[in-house]
């Protein structure tokens, strides 16, 4: 290890090294003060000296009379009748390294699940491309559905990583699903958090196998999924809403109107730039999105949200980049927006800044109430647009405009925007065959 202070190391490396050392100190009841001015080497040397001299129960001796240059000691071994096994190396330094490796492994075996979760989250933040929204979801799932669940009188977070077995995980999942309060999707989300933690533990050489891979979730009981067929804007509601907004030139109103004329997400509407709009060819190129994300602190709290402009789209595939056609109504809306914001970088810039999803939804709710229709979130506009555009034969085209890489994703968006409960047209060909 280089002689560096924690302030000279990158955040992730410093945190992992410091956590390892502090966990060792806690495991062996060593109360050392540690400051940023003390080098990691100094702290490690001090701690390892204590472990070798105070924690290691066996004498270290020069065995060179038997083998030249050899040093030896013993390690605890409960399987051996004498309760120990020999450890030999060809130098004192290598013997000490082997001892530290052994006690580090013992520290890993005694690492609690709560510590592993914290370390995994920091790893996902600093070393992977995980989105901040995903990390927030992981933390919420952990705190709400895993932390505090007791199995055999012990909370899940207090179990050591080495104690987690498929049998224990089965008992955990059976406990949270026995009253059918969890949907299958929710349980899958919880499973993903645990699986990610154990996969990371494998990378750190803490465990060798991911225990959750042997857990069959099909054997559990689930809460039935809510019928969301009608949870979407209807054609009548959209007609009322857009008529109510027709003469409104507020940037949020115009953005909502345009959203009903494109296959775009709200983040893509917010990231739409004038350079992406081609009035002559009646097209708009979707290639940016804007998100407002908080920063994750090392203590797993969140700081204030900041605007992030991303040049990749949801799904992170090339399918997200797409050119969409502008209808007459869409052209008219964009021309109004150009009059309101002729010199801005982005199409919609209330108060000189791009629109915010939270405010977009607040305005949408306000407008829905004023128009006398049920409110649905901005995401449901995509459901409406996809369902309205689909004619039974153009699934591939609709999927392409939605920016989906798989048509199965598009099928999820199709809803009954007419919401006719009796559906008389589907009965037309039943009964006695009609004469041609």
Image (tube, rainbow, N blue to C red):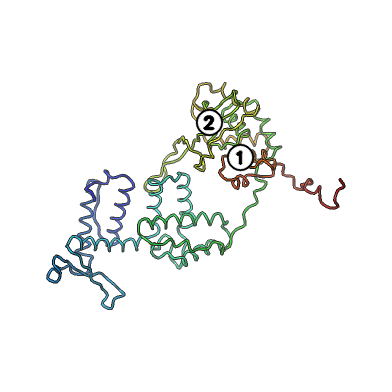
Residue 143 is labelled as none
Which residue is located at x 49 percent, y 42 percent?
Answer: 316
Can you give x and y, in whole percent of width and height, for residue 333 in the image?
A: 61, 26
Image: 283 above or below 423 = above
Residue 272 is labelled as 2
Q: Is residue 43 left or right of residue 128?
A: left
Q: Is residue 182 left or right of residue 327?
A: left
The residue under label 1 is 382
Which residue is located at x 33 percent, y 45 percent?
Answer: 11
Image: 123 above or below 221 = above
The quadrant in which the C terminus is found is: top right
Give SS at disc 1: helix
Q: Is residue 353 left or right of residue 64?
A: right
Q: CA distance from mark 2 to mark 1?
A: 16 Å
Can you give x and y, in whole percent of width and height, for residue 380 in the image?
A: 61, 41
Can you give x and y, in whole percent of width and height, for residue 319 in the image?
A: 54, 40
């Amino acid at each position: 290890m280089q002689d560096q202070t924690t302030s000279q190391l990158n955040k992730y490396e410093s945190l992992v090294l410091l956590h390892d050392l502090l966990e060792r100190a806690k495991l062996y009841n060593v109360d050392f003060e540690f400051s940023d001015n003390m080098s990691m080497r100094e702290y490690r040397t001090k701690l390892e000296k204590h472990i070798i001299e105070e924690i290691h129960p066996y004498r270290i001796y020069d065995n060179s009379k038997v083998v030249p240059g050899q040093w030896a000691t013993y390690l605890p071994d409960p399987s051996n009748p004498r309760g120990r096994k020999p450890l030999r190396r060809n130098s004192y330094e290598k013997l000490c390294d082997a001892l530290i490796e052994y006690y580090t492994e013992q520290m890993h075996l005694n690492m609690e699940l709560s510590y592993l979760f914290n370390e995994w989250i920091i790893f996902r933040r600093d070393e992977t491309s995980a989105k901040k929204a995903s990390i927030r979801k992981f933390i919420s799932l952990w705190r709400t559905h895993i932390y505090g669940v007791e199995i055999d009188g012990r909370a899940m977070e207090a179990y050591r990583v080495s104690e987690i077995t498929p049998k224990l995980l089965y008992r955990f999942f059976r406990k949270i699903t026995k009253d059918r309060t969890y949907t299958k999707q929710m349980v899958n989300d919880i499973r993903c958090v645990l699986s990610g933690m154990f996969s990371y533990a494998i990378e750190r050489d803490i465990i060798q196998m991911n225990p959750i891979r042997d857990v069959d979730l099909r054997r559990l009981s689930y809460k039935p999924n809510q019928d969301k067929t009608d949870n979407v804007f209807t054609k009548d509601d959209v007609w009322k809403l857009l008529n109510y907004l027709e003469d409104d030139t507020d940037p949020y109103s115009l953005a909502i109107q345009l959203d009903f004329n494109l296959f775009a997400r709200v983040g893509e509407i917010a990231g739409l730039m004038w350079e992406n709009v081609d009035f002559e060819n009646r097209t708009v190129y979707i290639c940016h999105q804007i998100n407002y994300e908080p920063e994750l602190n090392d203590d797993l709290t969140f700081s204030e949200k900041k605007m992030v402009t991303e040049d990749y789209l949801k799904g992170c595939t090339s399918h997200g980049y797409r050119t969409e056609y502008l209808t007459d109504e869409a052209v008219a809306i964009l021309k109004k927006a150009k009059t309101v914001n002729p010199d801005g970088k982005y199409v919609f810039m209330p108060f000189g800044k791009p629109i915010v999803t939270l405010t977009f939804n607040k305005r949408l709710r306000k407008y829905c109430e004023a128009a006398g229709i049920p409110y649905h979130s901005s995401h449901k506009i995509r459901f409406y647009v996809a369902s309205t555009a689909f004619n039974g034969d153009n699934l591939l085209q609709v999927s392409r405009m939605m920016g989906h890489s798989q048509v199965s994703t598009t099928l999820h968006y199709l809803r009954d925007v007419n919401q006719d409960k009796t559906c008389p047209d589907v009965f037309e060909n039943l009964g006695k065959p009609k004469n041609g």
